[in-house]
Image: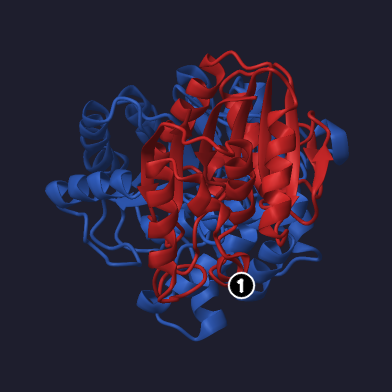
Amino acid sequence: MIVTAAICPSPPLLARELTGRAEILPELRAACAAAVGRLLAAAPDVVVIVGAGQETATWNPDDRLDLSAYAPPVSGARGKPGLALALGIGALLLDRAGYAGPRILQAVDESAPSADCLRLGRDLAAAAPRVALLAVGDGSTRRGPAAPGYLDERAVPFDDVVQQAVRDGDMAVLAGLDPDLARDLMATGRAAWQVLAGAFAGTRPATEISYAADPFGVAYLVAMLT
Amino acid sequence: MDDVAAAPDGAQAARERGPLRLGRAEFAPEQRLVMAIVNRTPDSFYRPGVTWDVGAALDQVHAAVAEGADILDVGGVPAKPGPEVTVAEEIRRVVPFVASVRTAYPDLVISADTWRHEPARAVCEAGADLLNDTWSGWDPKVADVAAEFGAGLVCSHVGTLTPRTRPFRPFFTDVMADVADRVLGLAERARRAGVDPARIVIDPAHDFGKNTWHSLELTRRLGELTATGWPVLLSASRKDFVGETLGAPVEDRLAGTLAVTAVGAWLGARIFRAHDVRATRQALDMVGAIRGDLPPARTVRGLA
């Protein structure tokens, strides 16, 4: 069963090697590190990283983000071409926390219907007596004219709904997010959040949001759910 | 000019492409260093007299350091012909100033642009780390001074010129071969004189004893010099070959200078003597990033 879960965003700039000589968003890094730290403090049997990918599939636990895909001169150890960004960032966060225990890298098809995501969440929750879930993904990418996806008026309301649902521990709202709207808004976190909702199905976890901001026009959310 | 045996070809004259030591600093081969020019003269070719006043010269030092200079190159005698500057006068212009800079910046690498051993000795006593002997070993005792003080030495090429003369119809069968022979020969002589090989720099000396075609050829083939492993100093800032190439007066030669800088950096030069410190620093950092030696300052585009 799920003993604890965390939500983290997945911008490549969380990989320190990719931001040049400057450290970008140290407060976001700190929030992610703290969330992962609390995840591990629950002494899970296994940490499941779930994030959107091209298809629903389990990757090798040793796979890591292929940093050279983002910055050709940078090479990461064990970089796995094709590993989804969200899984790579999740793995990086676990590595940075010094976690060497069992982990599952679970990609979920970015366009998977909500029902499939929820079912996957229920299955993952049953993977071990004590499962910690790290759901990695982002809110909308169209929060303003300077945002990577330019402005879409639906973006801010969509992110507000997600944030409020997480704040309330209301898994039904997450389960009900519209995949088509999320795709239009380039919100890469939708599928992972619905996996999370499936894992917590029938319960209302206590939650704590430690970071919610859009410094570069993408909605980043860091939260704990227990 | 004294005789310097032509450098033997190949391995014997080459050195490992290793660190360059200047003063207490050590610079890796991948670092590209800006050498900021500070003239203690009333009549240098670019902005003559602008740092003739000591206060103005010190202000320029502060600015150069703030803008990213790694080395300061202080000179008291213009390269071009003109009123005689005696040894005593050169010392008067340069040495107290170097001492002041040394006091203000204990760790800054200070180079002295001089070709005579008396000012060289005095300026080393005042704290200079590098002797920029632009006139190609005209006074061999400069190398002895460098050895005595543990200072570095720039070994340059001026063809057949004597100090403070202009080229008159210079010609070469192969200008790069002539340059390489001379500077490698001088480097070898310096090493025999006891100069620390890690402190020896070679300089093809654009414009010195060369016409514009020659300087362009040396720029094009600079890789042949850097391939020797000796650190190469590129001194092209606002020089006549840039001006003639672009049809531009001295105040309009920055873009051309930066183009030479970028090409030289790409081909492996390690020190860049410059009037325009900030622009040169930026050009070099850009080349460093393109080559993959220096990470960009801050990357967010497409990564958020």
The answer to whether residue B47 is left or right of residue A7 is left
Depth check: give the residue in front, A115 or A82.
A115
Q: How many marks?
A: 1
Is residue B163 visible in the rendered image? The answer is no
Amino acid bearing label 1: Asn
Which residue occupies the extreme front position in the image? A202
Relative to B276, does residue A167 appear above or below in the rendering?
Answer: above
Q: Residue furthest bottom?
A: B247
For the point 75% across and 36% down, which residue is it? A123
Work out whether B143 lies above or below A17. above
How did the renderer colour the structure? by chain
Q: Does residue B106 appear in the picture of this structure? A: yes
How far across and how far down the image is residue B207, in percent? 55, 65
Q: Residue at x 27, y 30 (%)?
A: B105
Q: Which residue is mark 1?
A: B211
**Percent coordinates x, y for residue B117 in the rendering:** 43, 33
Query: Where in the figure is residue B274, as x and y percent of width and height?
Result: 43, 56
Q: Which residue is drawn at the image coordinates 25% and 50% (left, top)?
A: B63
Describe the element under mark 1 as helix, strand or loop: loop
Q: Which image quarter: residue A114? A: bottom right
Q: Is residue A111 above or below residue B4?
A: below
**The hue in which chain A appears in the rendered picture of the protein:** red
- Chain for numbered disc 1: B
Q: How many C-alpha atoms fall within 10 Å of the one at disc 1: few (<14), some, or many (≥20)?
A: some
B251 relative position to A128: left or right: left
Shade representing chain B? blue
Foreground of the two, B245 or B193:
B245
| Image spot of residue A205 (x, y percent) | 46, 33
Image position of B203 (left or right of B240): right
The one nearer the camera, B261 or A102, is A102
